[in-house]
Image (cartoon, rainbow, N blue to C red):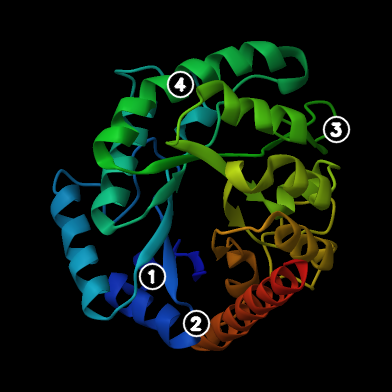
Amino acid sequence: MYISTSTEPLFNLFGYKKALNMLKDAGFTAFDLTLCGSSPFPCAPFDGDDYAEVAREVRAYADSIGFPCNQAHAVFGSHYGAAKPGTDIFEGTVRSMEIASIVGAKAIVVHPMQYLYYMSNAEFLKEENLRFYNDLLPYAEKFGIIMLTENMWQNNPNNGCIIQSTCAEAKEFCEYVDMINSPYLKACLDIGHTDLTGESVANMIKTLGKDRLFGLHIHDVDGHRDNHTLPYTRHVNFAEMIDSLAEIGYEGDVTFEAMGFVMPFPEALFPSAFRLMADVGHYFADEISKKMAVEK
């Protein structure tokens, strides 16, 4: 079980060599390659025509220090329009998948489309996402990388409060994975998003089950905002998460998406902040393993 965290915005701040060494020295055993930004194409240093060459350089360096990429995150393009083949949104997602495969990720999070108000368009969005993931499936097979759909949230247009969106309920999350019916589409459960949209973490994990649940985005939230901060500092019940992952025999990794904890610190304290995050990750892995052994 790898302990990893997202890389954004570390590559931009420090360059990939310093960033990867910082995470490894902090105690992480892998890294989650963040490719998403404001553009429908992968962010720096992969935003040029030489993206594949840069990806090979990152892979070679990561291999040289024994620090693998376990997971990646594709661009956010599907939030902003229909991601159809030939559009920048779709092509940016394909490029993300190619880069992630070169760097060595075994899976990549590809957000489901939610560019319309979910409460009025849930069934249409499901049809759109069926097409979207099916269109991407040949590329997943080509690059040998698993796509991970994720549970999402939206803002209420009337008051700005967070409300449910695609895959926010356990039943629909399962339907999204099952409707593709391919080993190249699984689920990444965002623990913070689950709390924000009112779904039980335990129910989500147990309903998804071992076969669907491939990866995690672990972070804490205050119940009102998507804080992306360190576990045990806000509202989420992480004991429930640990127990439920052990109960289903979870075989994935412990991956953080908690840069909201690190970024407020001065850069000189980033290594210390990352060490605490990695310690929490190892604690999660140890507790899950212990409880799984008891279950057996």
Amino acid type for the residue under numbered disc 1: Leu
Q: Quadrant of the C terminus?
A: bottom right
Provide the residue designation for mark 1: 13
Q: Point out which mark residue 208 bears.
A: none
Secondary structure of residue under mark 3: loop
**Above or below: residue 264 compared with residue 112:** below
Residue 166 at least partly seen: no
In percent of the image, x 34 and y 35: which residue is there? 140
Amino acid type for the residue under numbered disc 4: Phe
Residue density around tag 4, few if under 14, some if 14–19, many if 20 or more, within 10 Å: many
Q: How many marks?
A: 4
Query: Which of disc 4 and disc 1 is earlier in sequence?
Result: 1
In percent of the image, x 54 and y 63: which residue is there? 253
- Position of residue 223 in the picture relative to residue 24 (left or right): right
The x, y position of residue 293, in whole percent, is 70, 73
Kindly indicate whether the residue at mark 2 contacts the one at mark 3 (C-beta within 8 angstroms).
no
Kindly indicate whether the residue at mark 1 contacts the one at mark 2 (C-beta within 8 angstroms).
yes
Amino acid type for the residue under numbered disc 3: Asn
Secondary structure of residue under mark 2: helix
**Above or below: residue 263 compared with residue 146:** below
Q: Point out which mark residue 132 bears.
A: 4
Secondary structure of residue under mark 4: helix
Provide the residue designation for mark 3: 159
- Position of residue 184 in the picture relative to residue 292 (left or right): left
The x, y position of residue 76, in whole percent, is 48, 38
**Which quadrant would residue 66 be assigned to in this image?**
bottom left
Query: Which of disc 1 and disc 2 is earlier in sequence?
Result: 1
Compute the Cα span from label 2 to label 1.
Answer: 10 Å
Provide the residue designation for mark 2: 267
Compute the Cα span from label 3 to label 4.
Answer: 30 Å
